[in-house]
Amino acid sequence: MLSNTLRAAALTLLASTAFAGEGHNHGDHSGHGAHAGHGEMAVLATTDTGLVIKDGFARAATSVSKSGAAFLLVENTGDTADRLIDASSDAAQRVELHTHIDNGDGVFRMVHVPEGFELAPGATLKLARGGKHVMLMGLNAPMLEGGEVAITLTFERAGDVEVMVPVDLERGAGHGHGGHGHNHDS
Ligand SMILES: [Cu+2]
């Protein structure tokens, strides 16, 4: 794990923006905050089976956060169903597929989804703030603006697909957000 740590540190050291922060939570209690502000629909990877992985980004609430999350879209342009069943990354000690569920009282709670997310033919799986996401627990290095996180997505049918996801700390933070995480300097 040490070499992983060094690698992750090297990646994130590419970022030059320093920012102060407080708290260490995942930051997404308020749910429907995912209005993409300045997203390009960059394609990160495609598979022979017709999956198109695009529009990804990763974030953590602060520079001292112990965890972060990654978000992206997976479009199934093929004619066979698939399923996103796992994710892994050297950037964190533990990586899980998560979603948010509403307890019924308006409070959203993150839960691990071990069975993963279905990908019907023609459907687009959306991992977005306030909803499904790749959870990165125990970050090996701070997640800094301008950095990148390598994430391997495991699909039931298409197998492992590695994507490089840019760190974007501001994305989706402008609307319906709980109020934490507005700590960037610029
Ligand atoms: Cu989570």
Image (cartoon, helix red, strand yellow):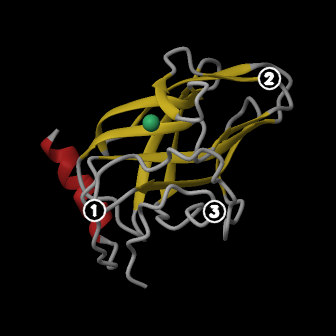
Which of disc 1 and disc 3 is earlier in sequence? 1
Cα distance between the residues tagged 2 and 1:
40 Å
For marks 3 and 2, give the CA distance: 30 Å
Return the disc, 2 or 1, that comes first in the chain's sequence: 1
Task: Give the residue pinned by disc 2.
Answer: 120
Quarter of the C terminus within the rendering: bottom left
Residue at 41% of width from left, 63% of height from top? 181
Which mark, by number, is residue 22? 1
- The answer to whether residue 127 is above or below residue 17 is above
User: Which kind of residue does numbered mark 3 sit on?
Assistant: His
Residue 68, horizontal then vertical, whole percent: 38, 48
**Ligand 1 quadrant?**
top left
Residue pointed to by mark 3: 175
Amino acid carrying label 1: it is: Glu
How packed mark 1 is, by other alpha carbons closer than 10 Å (few <14, some 14-19, many 20 or more), is some
Q: Which disc is residue 90 wearing? A: none
In this rendering, the answer to whether 137 lies above or below 97 is: below
**Residue at image coords 68%, 44%:** 73
Q: Decide: is 178 above or below 168.
A: above
